[in-house]
Image (cartoon, rainbow, N blue to C red):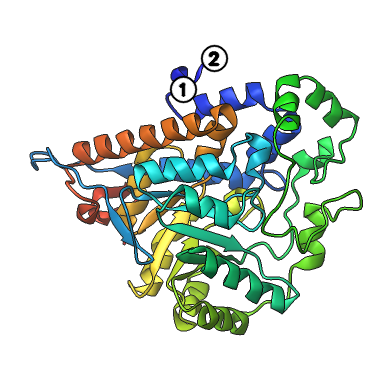
Amino acid sequence: MRLTDCHNFHDFRRLAKSRLPGPIFNYIDGGADDEVTYRRNTSSFEECDLVPGVLRGVSDIDTSVTVLGQTLSLPVYCSPTALQRLFHHQGERAVAAAAGKVGTMFGVSSLGTVSLEEVRKISDGPQVYQFYFHKDRSLNAEMMARAKSAGVEVMMLTVDSITGGNRERDKRTGFAIPFRLNLAGITQFAAKPAWAINYLTHEPFRLPQLDRHVDMGSSALSISRYFTEMLEDSMNWDDVAEMVRLWDGPFCLKGIMSPDDAKRAVEVGCSGIVVSNHGGRQLDGSRASFDQLAEIIGAVGGRIDVMMDGGVQRGSHVLKALSLGAKAVGLGRYYLFPLAAAGQAGVDRALELMRLEIVRGMRLMGAKSIRELSPKNLRFRGCGPRV
């Protein structure tokens, strides 16, 4: 299978699976516990139908949006995700370049494998820095100061990961960072020697946002221990309010699923929230992001920018979220599988396919701009329009 044979999410996933060792593929592909929420994230879109309009004169289509004070050419952005150079040696460099080409926002994780500063030089598009709240409060302040100095526009605090989810696929192979594979995991790595050659012939694996704080050497602190030992499980709304004040710019909370929490985010001065369950990788059995979107948007009443991520595989999924009132939609696995399959060329192709699907869908919906999408364009199975 070649990159040119990839026409949708599932094609990219198959190509990535053919290239990656099993433990790494399953790290991307897997969720928590029984993966019910992971599956539900995508299936929830299937219970919502688009209602197209016709004869609207849609020769010119405007896909741009403004979110968190940033103008994006597309209503989708590349969500910050961890460990990208494990999937392909280009890692965050490829994602930043691809996002820059289409004029959208991209994120760098505190568990990213390329530095904030280097990635900032690759694209002048809006950049998000995603970070976790540490027990060492001075570390939190230092990380924000570094992001500000690097020219990052948006700070994104992940609030649903004070401890790691129970990802059983990783346990079956012994996948961890640093690698501590069991026999099953080692066997799966041995079956993909091309990946190993690629990995070993490029620069050493690093976590440059954390390498002054987390020892990745022979006595390394593993990623799972990072979550359980270094992150602050007593984080509260007062801590968020203080970080909003220190950042003094667009500040977003990622991992909001409750209307009450969305209201609190408004009260403490956040600029935006991401309705997200971490791709089904944290609390299994929780609601799908799309299922919570309308209720949360109704609760905040336009006082804060609401985005969402989780399970998005098609342009039609994006149009449904935007019709409910989301300002933009985050992509995760949608670009990670293309990255693993072919580096920047894969991400370029995936984002272009998404752009084409959104433009085509808007034409068929009779919408010349994102602003023309509304709940009137939707019907949920068994009920009327959901406001």
Classify mark 2: helix, strand or loop: loop
Q: Residue at x 19, y 38 (%)?
A: 363
| Residue drawn at 45 percent across, 65 percent down | 153
* For residue 299, above or below residue 84: below
Give the side of residue 189 with respect to residue 20, left or right. Answer: right
- Residue 1 is tagged as 2
**Which numbered disc, 2 or 1, marks the residue that appears first in the sequence?**
2
The one of 274 and 225 positioned closer to us in this rendering: 225
* Amino acid bearing label 2: Met
Amino acid type, callout 1: Cys
Q: Quadrant of residue 324?
A: bottom left
Quarter of the rendering occupied by the N terminus? top right
Q: Are marks 2 and 1 in contact (CB under 8 Å)?
A: yes
In the image, taking residue 294 as reference, residue 240 lies left or right, namely: right
- Residue receiving disc 1: 6
Identify the residue at image location x=44%, y=78%. 266
| Image position, residue 66 (x, y; %) | 31, 60
| Quarter of the rendering containing residue 164 | bottom right
The residue nearer to you, when weighing 35 against 108, is: 108
Q: Residues within 10 Å of mark 2 (few under 14, many from 20)?
A: few
Task: Left or right? Give the position of 287 relative to 199.
Answer: left
